[in-house]
Image (spheres, grey):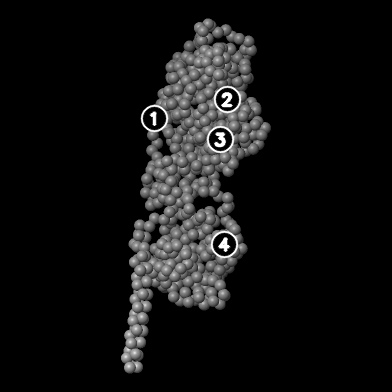
Amino acid sequence: MGRKRKTRSSKFLFFVVWLGIAGVVGFFLQIWFQLPAIEALNEYLPSESTLVYSADGKVLARFHREENRSVVPLSKISIYLQKAVIAAEDPRFYQHHGLDFWGIIRAAIKNFAYGRVVEGGSTITQQLARNLFLTKKKTLVRKLAEALIALKIEHHYTKEEILELYLNQVYLGHNAYGVESAANLYFGKTAAELDLAEAAMIAGLIRGPELYSPYRNFKGAKIRQVYVLNKMLEQNLVTEREAKLAAIETLNFSPRNLKSLGEIAPYFITYLLQDLIAKYGEEMVYHGGLRVYTTLDTAMQAKAEEVIQKFVSEEGPKYRFSQAALLSIDPRTGYIKAMVGGEDFAESKFNRATQAKRQPGSAFKPFVYAVAMEQGIPPWTIFYDTKTTFRVWPSRWNPDGTWTPKNFDGKYRGPVTLRYALEKSLNIPSIKLLERVGIQNVIDLARRMGITSHLEPGLSLTLGASEVSLLEMTSAFGVFANGGIRVEPTAIVKIENRDGVIIYEHKIQEKRVLDENVAAQVVDLMKGVLTNGTGVRGRIDRPAAAKTGTTQDFRDAWFIGFVPQLVTGVWVGNDDNTPMQGVAEVAVCPRIWKEYNQAVLAGEPILDFPKPVWPKYEPPQEEEVVTAEGEENQPEENLEKPEGKND
């Protein structure tokens, strides 16, 4: 009887044991079959920041959302950093197969001795498994899944491949994922350029990126750096002398005020970003790891920002302007070389170089003179600069349908040549010239040259009454500088995908929109603006041409000038359209243009424009000027000889 009872107990125990084993096996199998397919790592494409480069190869910006990451191969990661990470995180990385049982035991003993967690037992492979496939929730199931995934990863990939994945995936603080982004964030370097001290500092961040950030807790970061150096020394990865020198090395951190939109050229970068999103969409731009090579010249950009900030801060209060913009384009290629959309991007993101539409004033007159040259009207043609009343469409400004404009200084100069009228920016001859050549002809030419904004078809067109952008005007003036050939402005040279394959390359497309000799004739007239006219204070020591522009009540001031290889537009004013005071008399815009161009053109070859061919000279005959009613206009009071003062 007792033997039977004993046999039953043994069978029951045997059944329970096997049931337990089956349960454990079933539990493991359930986890195993729910594990992600490790083979997916073959096509794994982590979210990667888009990098923007200047024309001289400098990183201007990184576009990203949640994760700022730049993926690099192991060969482009400092060997110091590789060793530092292994020493600190997984000393037996090259000996284990995903799980380090000795490491787990060692960590447990050490943590028990200290009474708190001072060392982890997870291998680099386990951390990679957690980062890629699992949450950070601390449960038994998650830990088991982590271990099993680590074993599968080790079975499918080499140690070098695992280390490369880990170093590109690990979070290192301040939205930086991967060692390349961290190297740039903390030291302004690539991961390949890190020295031992810098590598140990970054490796020390892995355990607590936010806690040990050198920007928030330098003391804690330093303790972690020394810890990593000691671990490297223990494993004979560095000599004692190397470790000591690294520990006392002064680290040069990047300024913490770097913005995702770039340290320099923020207006250019936002302009570029809008273009990229329109072409490729936000997902590709923020996560696709594009490499965007731009036209921006960092030296020109730095000078442009310096000059704009200087004039706004020093002269703005005196002459009552609070904003300014500058744009430089190579007229031969359309490449935007510098762009400043305002005095301070941090204060205002509105781009006054591309988004603002303002009246250009007399800066629009060269379009009228270009049509005159097309129609064979020579520059020695005489027009009367006299008080004149024009018939216009009735409006709230001209309810009786008449308009009697004035010159800038309120004076009249009598009979003047077209050349003189442009140099001195005289309004009355320009309006009469517009009447003669035809308003629609001028609008058509402006369109061909790159003006896309609405142009009001009235006589005030020649005075720049229609609002346009600085980008439009500067690009259009590039046609004059480029011998009548239009080249669309661009900020992008080429774009590569994350694999280095070119997916876009800008093709310079030239289009003749103005006769070459007509362009040369207009340039010849505009040279006089700098040598004898309203822009004389912008004169530089090389052949150049330009045009000033000031609007009614001094709400806007413009200066657009060019040499054969560079056209630069400058605008100053106020966002609320309030009048300025004295900006024309002291030539703020010409002086901004001059200071900028003298600096950026230093060392550049001195080029001249083609010489124009003029029709056979005939003694000038006075242009008969009539009013809208058909009555001959006689010179009025307040006349001044042609050699009168600049306006």
**Between disc 1 and disc 3, whose residue precedes?**
3
The residue carrying pointer 1 sits among few (fewer than 14), some (14 to 19) or many (20 or more) residues within 10 Å by Cα, namely some
Alpha carbon distance from label 4 to label 1: 59 Å
**The disc labelled 1 sits on which kind of residue?**
Lys
Q: Position of residue 188 (x, y in %)?
A: 53, 54
* Mark 2 secondary-structure assignment: loop
For label 4, the residue is 211
Give the mark nearer the N terminus: 2 vs 3: 3
Residue 418's place in the image compared with 170, above or below, is above
Residue drawn at the location 43% of the way across and 20% of the way down: 441
Residue matched to label 3: 325
The Cα–Cα distance between marks 4 and 3, rounded to whole angstroms, is 42 Å
- Which residue appears at 56% of the width and 19% of the height? 397
Rounded to the nearest angstrom, the CA distance separating label 2 from label 3 is 16 Å
- The residue indicated by pointer 2 is 551
Amino acid type assigned to the residue bearing label 2 in the image = Thr
Q: Decide: marks 4, 1 in contact (CB < 8 A)?
A: no
Q: Is residue 234 visible?
A: yes
The image quarter in which residue 28 lies: bottom left
Taking depth in this image into account, of 84 and 424 the one nearest to the observer is 84
> How much space separates mark 1 and mark 3, taking CA atoms?
28 Å
Which amino acid does the dot numbered 4 rest on? Answer: Leu
Mark toward the start of the polypeptide (1 vs 2)? 1
Residue 311: name its quadrant: top right
